[in-house]
Amino acid sequence: MWLTIVIIAQFINAIVFLCDKYLLGGGRIGKPAVYAFYVGILGIFALVLIPFGGLVFPGVNQLLIDLLAGAVYILACLIFYQTLKQNEASRVVPVVGSFIAVFTLILSALFLGEQLTPKFISAFSLLLVGSILISIRLNIRINAEKVRIDADNISVNQRSNPRKSASSQCNFLLTVLASFIFSVFYILTKYIYLHQPFISGFIWSRFGGVIAALILLTLPAVHRTIFKSPIKILSQGQPSLSWRKSTPVLFLSNQLMSGINFILINWAVSLASVALVSALQGVQYVFIFLISLFLARYPRVLTEEISRSIIIQKIIAILLIGIGIFLINR
């Protein structure tokens, strides 16, 4: 059951990924801290889950862990959105996904006592390699007029000037940092679900995200931006009136999908190994690739330049991920 939940969640996550890059690109939402604020503050809507499982006071110590988990998630999102805004999404997301899987594997063994059996390691390795292989050459550029998919090598140009190299190194370190903090969040949530009912633990942890969002509000730049008209915040930088009108709707729709995805991933974490759930990030890349191929039939929306070698590479990656999923189910 948990595997089906993860696959559905990663399909939704692929759509959210494309929308996030669109919203964070071109100045549509100027500050990653503003985007992180809205992600955190919208966690208050987790209260709608109370009729499905209730809200139980877990005790002071457990409550502090719940709140910490929610705050850690917003911190990870803040750093992730900053790197996503400054870099190609297809450069950032695969690196983040891969490092999250590795960090989570290590932390789950150290702090949760998860046993690393040969089958577990084999499945994890295939999923990780497949995730890297399917994503290392796919560049996705999104703007207000079209989505452009290019086959490109993501390695850093060694002949770039020193200033750009330093900036690239800083962005890479931020990406690794975001990955580690996301991993800490996953470990905390797994610990929570080992000691608390799923719905109750999930709701309390969302309150931690709300508190983190309110802390972001104390930053002067964020405060000034937030107290503008929400329509202006979500529509700045748009090239046309139609795009300005559509951006708030897209943002809220994307947050709804992101919320559903977040609940599903947390549900899967509560049911299975947190390391394997994180390693299944590669399923998202499969969906991104397939969606890209489908949208390529509509050249006014998407322009795709993928060679035969790239197609073969993606197929091999999908096979590796498929074998990894097969080993999980054995």
Image: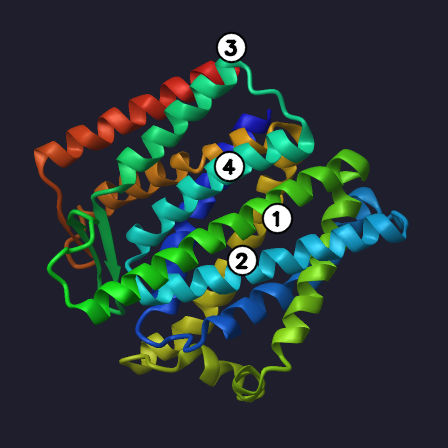
Crowd rating for badge 2 (residues with CA inside 10 Å; few <14, some 14–19, many 20+): many
Q: Which residue is mark 3?
A: 330
Q: Quadrant of the N terminus?
A: top right
Q: Pointers 3 and 4 in contact (CB under 8 A)?
A: no
> Helix or strand or loop: what does disc 2 sit on?
helix
Amino acid type shown at disc 3: Arg
Is 233 located above or below residue 32 in the figure? below
Distance Cα–Cα, label 3 vs label 4: 19 Å
Is 230 located above or below residue 134 in the figure? below
Q: Which residue is mark 1?
A: 185
Amino acid type shown at disc 2: Ala
Is 226 located above or below residue 80 in the figure? below
Q: Nearer the viewer, residue 321 or 64?
A: 64
Residue at x 81%, y 39% (from the top left corner) = 196
Residue 230 is situated, as x and y percent measured from the top left of the image, at: 53, 81
Residue 236 is situated, as x and y percent measured from the top left of the image, at: 38, 82
Residue at x 28%, y 36% (from the top left corner) = 134
Q: Which residue is mark 2?
A: 76
Q: In terms of image quadrants, where is residue 18?
A: bottom left
Residue 131 is situated, as x and y percent measured from the top left of the image, at: 35, 35
Q: Nearer the viewer, residue 58 or 101?
A: 101
Mark before the other along the chain sequence, 2 or 3? 2
> Helix or strand or loop: what does disc 4 sit on?
helix
Can you tell which of label 3 and label 1 is closer to the viewer?
1
> Helix or strand or loop: what does disc 1 sit on?
helix
Residue sitting at the far front: 162
Amino acid type shown at disc 1: Phe
Crowd rating for badge 3 (residues with CA inside 10 Å; few <14, some 14–19, many 20+): few
Distance Cα–Cα, label 2 vs label 4: 15 Å
> Helix or strand or loop: what does disc 3 sit on?
loop
Dot label at residue 241: none
